[in-house]
Every structure is written in structure tokens, then in C-alpha cells.
Amino acid sequence: MKKLFLSLLLTSALFANELTIKSDDGFILHGWLNKPTTTKQSSPIILFAHQFGSDHTIWNDLAKKFNAKGYATLSIDLRGHGKSILQNDKENKVVIASSFEHIKEALIQSDKKISFENIPLDLTAWLEHISEDESLDIENLYLFGSSLGAGTMIPILNEYEAKGLVAISAGKLEKLSEDIDMALAGSMTKTIFIASKNDPLNANKITMEYTIKSILGTSLIISGEGHGTVILPKVEHFIFSFMNNIK
């Protein structure tokens, strides 16, 4: 019986704890918290924000690797994506592009419905929510974002001095330009901006712009034309090196 109990305990530790919060404008937001199997008084925490048209699962493989290294991870579904599609008891989700060429139009249409400028407030609400968990060291905070998730994550630096930020194919919302510029100019967070040389959504240009504006920003431009987490296999080892150098 003791062995069975221990087996069940270890198995349950492999599954994420699903959390929900409510945004100021009525979205029920979903997130998945995984804690490392190593026993520590408190664990550093990584907040993952995905790209447009996807959900939290695009970070699964990377998150598991960081769990094994002693990090807790919170991967969320952004408003209008995945399970975070109920607003005031009505379904409200992003417009999915029929092809890559239609992504910009889908982004514009989705922004009108979803109000992407409120994502930084959502992300801040997530951090406030998990800060009540004493097993998490919110002072050891790291931020990972891809495309839409990266661009809307930068303004968090106006409220939280994270240890590090990893921004892959960072997007840019004009409504958040002032908040982004203020965060980049004022934050001492170590940041790595990553993009492919021929990014189809011009994230390479945005990456260089953000790097120049930031205090402790570094850029990494790789060959090819991939966008978002599709380039993770090429840059994963750079990310781990970046994280190791922060400690």
C-alpha cells in the first residue's frame, strides 16, 4: 500500500495544476503551473506567453526541461486562445488565419474583438495570483514570450524587475508602444531578443529595435525564415546558456 501511495504521489507530480483567474473585462483565463520535482524551500518561476493563434502547449517541451532544472513554470492561454475564450459567459476567441499570408489581417480583426492591449494587465494579474504561493520565489522571476506573447510581455517590466526575459520573434502593438519603450528604457532585466533573419512578420527588425532601446538587451538573429517557437530547436541551447549566465 505504501508503494502504491508513493507511486500515485509521484505520478500526480507529473501533471500540471490548472489555475484560473478573471480579467478586469470578464475573461476567464486558464494557466498550468508545474513545479520541479526537486525539493526546495521556494523555486524560481518562469511565466510563458505563447504566440498568436496557438496556446500554452507550444512551450510544453521547453517547460519540462526547465522543471527538471529546478524551475517552476506557469504556461498560460492568452485571452481569446485555447481555453481562455469565455468573456462574461460568452465565447470570444481570436480569428484564425487561413494561411500565413493572412495572419496580419487576422491579428487586426482579433484585436478588435479581444483587445490585445489588455494582455499585459492579464499577465500582471497572473503574477499577483501566484505570488501568494510560498513555494514560488517571485523575486526569481523569468519571462518567456513568443511573437504576440513576447510583445505584450515587455510592459510587465514596468511593474516587475524580472531576472531575465526571453523574447522570440517579438511582436509590436502600436497601442502598447509607449509602455514598451518605457519598460525597455527603464528596466535592468537581462533580455535576449531572438528572431530569424528573414522573419515573415518582420520580427527581425523589431528585435533589433527593441535591443537598441533596452539597457541590458542582447539580440540573436539566426538564419532562415521561421517565426515564433518553430525556431526553438535552433536556439534552445542559446536560451539555456543565457539563463545559466544570469544566475
Image: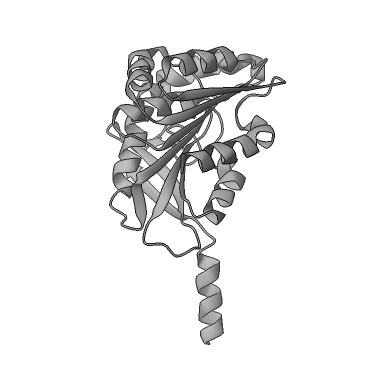
Please name the residue shown 69% across and 33% down the image.
234
Extreme residue toward the bottom, this view: 1
193, above or below 85, in the image: above
> Where's residue 184, x and y in %?
38, 20
* Viewer-side residue, 43 vs 125: 43
Please name the residue shown 50% across and 72% down the image.
9
When asked about the image quadrant of residue 86, the answer is top left
Please name the residue shown 53% across and 43% down the image.
244
Q: In this figure, which colouring scheme has been used for the structure? A: one colour
* Viewer-side residue, 108 vs 230: 230
Q: Residue 22, can we see it?
A: no
When asked about the image quadrant of residue 226, the answer is top right
State left or right for residue 223 relative to residue 43: right
Q: Residue 75, can we see it?
A: yes
> Where's residue 212, x and y in %?
47, 14
When asked about the image quadrant of residue 221, the answer is top right
> Where's residue 122, x and y in %?
35, 34
State left or right for residue 169 relative to residue 89: right
* Viewer-side residue, 183 vs 6: 183
- How many numbered marks are there? 0
Extreme residue toward the right, this view: 224
> Where's residue 62, x and y in %?
59, 44
